[in-house]
Image (cartoon, grey):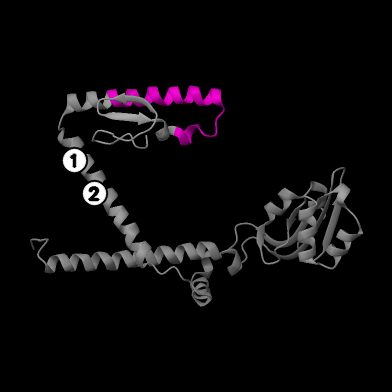
């Protein structure tokens, strides 16, 4: 529970829900768990949290009385505390020192050096797609679609409450395309041809145009794998930065005789 693990007496102000030994549970400690609930649900959930908190404090107090300064527990607490501090310091060092800028040239280099790792596991496709309510269909949208007036299409589809995918540079798995198309429409699509397809049903009009296709086991385009490349580059930079930092700390502490190693 947030705010319930203080070892000193709690002197905050607020609505007190319960107290046990030298600790107090306030409404604000659990408010975020109740905010999205109905009134009746909140009351029941609040009572549940209070009961659980009270029981936790009772068991914890009993454990302290029964186990006292148990060496195993104290050792685990010390290790966990050290782990938390170490992790937080590493995070802070990376936040202050890690260069997160990745140029296009660096992306290109990584892509070329690891090209064998980027074979597609599934077909991907670039396409344009809109879906508009049947009542919204007219000559305007037909013209916008045929002329590939993307700004006009975005505006019109948005106004009509439709759905659109009009980013010409975006690659998607073929399974994603099939998931948004009626079966009759996806059955028409020939991925090897740059063609436009349309379909109407009782509720909507669908338009789709295939722009480009890459088959399974082909090399993935750089734009499709950019995000995982960025993550890997940053991961490698982080490891290198931390390694150098650790070596620096080690040398500084040896120099100041803060640490000693018997050889």
> Could you say which is closer to the camera, residue 28 or residue 215?
28
235 horizontally vs 166: left or right? left
195 horizontally vs 84: left or right? right
Magenta region, mostly helix, strand or loop? Answer: helix
Q: Nearer the viewer, mark 2 or mark 1?
A: 2
> Could you say which is closer to the camera, residue 161 or residue 12?
12
Q: Residues within 10 Å of mark 1 (few under 14, many from 20)?
A: few
Q: Which mark is residue 75?
A: 1
State the image coordinates of residue 145 (x, y, percent, origin top left): 83, 63
State the image coordinates of residue 213 (x, y, percent, origin top left): 71, 64
Which residue in the rendered view is the most extreme toward the left?
262
213 horizontally vs 250: left or right? right
Residue 222 found in image quarter? bottom right
User: Which of marks 1 and 2 precedes in the sequence?
Assistant: 1
Q: Is residue 222 magenta?
A: no
Q: Residues within 10 Å of mark 2 (few under 14, many from 20)?
A: few
Q: Is residue 189 visible?
A: no
> Could you say which is closer to the camera, residue 94 or residue 177?
94
Q: CA distance from mark 2 to mark 1?
A: 11 Å
Q: Which region of the structure is painted magenta?
A: 31-58
Which residue in the rendered view is the most extreme toward the front?
13
Q: Which residue is mark 2?
A: 82
State the image coordinates of residue 209 (x, y, percent, origin top left): 79, 61
Residue 22 found in image quarter? top left
Q: Image quadrant for the N terminus?
A: top left
Q: Which mark is residue 183?
A: none
């Amino acid at each position: 529970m947030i705010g319930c693990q203080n070892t000193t007496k709690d002197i905050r102000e607020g609505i007190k829900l319960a107290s046990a030994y030298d600790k107090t549970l306030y409404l604000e400690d659990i408010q975020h768990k109740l905010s999205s609930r109905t009134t009746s649900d909140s009351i029941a959930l609040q009572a549940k949290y209070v009961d659980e908190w009270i029981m936790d404090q009772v068991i914890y107090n009993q454990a302290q009385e029964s186990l006292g300064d148990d060496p195993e527990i104290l050792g685990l607490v010390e290790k966990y505390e050290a782990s938390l501090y170490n992790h937080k310091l590493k995070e802070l060092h990376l936040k202050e020192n890690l260069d997160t800028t990745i140029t296009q040239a660096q992306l290109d280099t990584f892509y070329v050096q690891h090209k064998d790792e980027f074979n597609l596991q599934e077909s991907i496709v670039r396409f344009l797609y809109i879906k508009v309510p049947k009542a919204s269909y007219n000559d305007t949208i037909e013209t916008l679609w045929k002329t590939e007036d993307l700004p006009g299409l975005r505006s019109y589809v948005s106004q009509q409450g439709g759905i659109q995918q009009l980013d010409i540079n975006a690659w998607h798995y073929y399974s994603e395309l099939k998931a948004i198309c009626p079966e009759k429409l996806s059955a028409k699509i020939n991925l090897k041809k740059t063609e436009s397809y349309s379909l109407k049903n009782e509720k909507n009009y669908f338009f789709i145009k295939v722009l480009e296709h890459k088959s399974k086991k082909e090399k993935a385009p750089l734009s499709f794998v950019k995000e995982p490349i960025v993550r890997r580059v940053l991961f490698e930079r982080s490891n290198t930065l931390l390694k150098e930092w650790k070596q620096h700390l080690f040398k500084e502490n040896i120099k100041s005789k803060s640490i000693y190693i018997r050889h």
